[in-house]
Image (tube, rainbow, N blue to C red):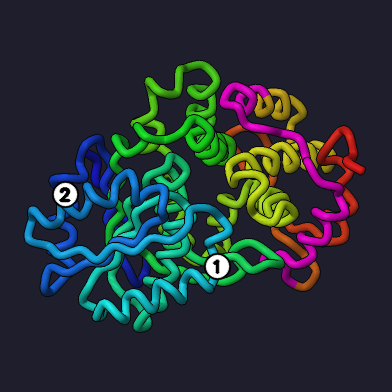
Amino acid sequence: MTELILKTDTTKSRLYLGTNILDDLLPKLCKSLSHDNKVAVITDNTVQSLYAERVSEILQNAGITSFVYSFHAGESSKTLATVEKIYEFLAQSGFSRTHPVIALGGGVVGDTVGFASATFLRGVRSIQIPTTLLAQVDSSVGGKCGVDLSCGKNLVGAFNQPDYVLIDTSLLSTLPSDVFTDGMGEVVKYGCIVDENLFCDLENKPIREILPDVIIRCVSHKRDIVEQDEHDTGLRMLLNFGHTIGHAIETCGNYNTYSHGQCVSRGMVAAVRIGIKLGITTPETLPRLQAVLAKYGLQTDIPYPTQCIADVLAKDKKVLSGKLNFILLEHIGKAVIHPIGLNDLIALLPTINETEVS
């Protein structure tokens, strides 16, 4: 087992990574947070059928009472309406600030439950147990949490570090292949922005053989970045590589057409094409990126007209005074923050796909 500590100016989050560590570690973490051995386990209906009973049994055997609540799986549940239902569940179950909340699931569960934990009673203790590759390498770490609005992704949220993140790679054994592929979008992102050696490994080695090491490397990179910039005002912006246009694609599809990882994949290729057009990205970056994305079944086309992308970008929460800090690559392993006028970025959108969708 590997233990990492994420320290910011005001909080400390402990990250545990390993295989088959859930049974032994979870009761200890819960007991350290709960004054009377009472916890909430909040998940979605897919993960509930796979792991909620096991988690409850682990806790029960350790003398801990768990209250389980689930909501419908999928991005469509990442809303304020779901958060309100979680509030009602916690309140009706008699939860106080001394009772921890466990987010058991993928990125949607982690983001939604994380936001509920940050705001219920002005903040309660929390544990993230990510069950997807995407959540294990990225979204469960760093304290960003929130929900979507109909006009844009992640427009309501908070920065709230969980007390613990328990990353048990054995939980990935039940992942459908398309959900595993989804997580590879974020894995490739880390290779692109900070770790060319990781990118080379993704190019040349079977992912299943190096997966535990890959997860540790991605989490370590995110830990290092978040420690320097918890609130996303500088260095942490690099983690948005591929996400600006990726989120726009998700929004154009009403959050239920393409998965997050598939949209990030498309957004990374779009950003590289824009970077080449601006003379910032080396041209050989594009075929390398396209090849590694294709290797893992990730898509690179832009499935919507550029006007739809432009309409969403105009509402992006990162736009300040008509400018947006867009993340580009100089080359594989080196990302840069490139301030660009919103209108200038929109003018570059025809660059993102060789064939415009009408």
Is 303 one of the magenta-colored residues? yes
Q: Which mark is residue 98?
A: none
Q: Which mark is residue 79?
A: 1
Residue at the spot of label 2: 25
In this view, the residue in front, 66 or 295, is 66
* Region rendered in magenta: 291-320
Where 93 falls versus 24 (above or below)? below
Q: Is residue 46 left or right of residue 75?
A: left
Q: How many other residues sit within 10 Å of disc 2, few (<14), some (14-19) or many (≥20)?
A: few
Q: Quadrant of the C terminus?
A: top right
Q: Quadrant of the N terminus?
A: top left
Amino acid type shown at disc 1:
Thr
Q: Residue at image x 68%, y 27%? A: 290
- Distance between the alpha carbons at the discs numbered 1 and 2: 31 Å
Q: How many other residues sit within 10 Å of disc 1, few (<14), some (14-19) or many (≥20)?
A: some
Q: Residue at image x 53%, y 73%? A: 80
Where 216 falls versus 84 (above or below)? above
In this view, the residue in front, 46 or 282, is 46
Query: Which element carries disc 1, helix, strand or loop?
Result: loop
Whole-percent x, y for residue 168 in the image:
28, 41
Q: Is residue 225 left or right of residue 19?
A: right
- Confirm whether residue 337 shows in the render: no
Whole-percent x, y for residue 4 in the image:
28, 48
Q: Residue at image x 68%, y 64%? A: 152
- Of the numbered discs 1 and 2, the one sitting upstream in the chain is 2
Whole-percent x, y for residue 137 in the image:
43, 43
Amino acid type shown at disc 2:
Leu
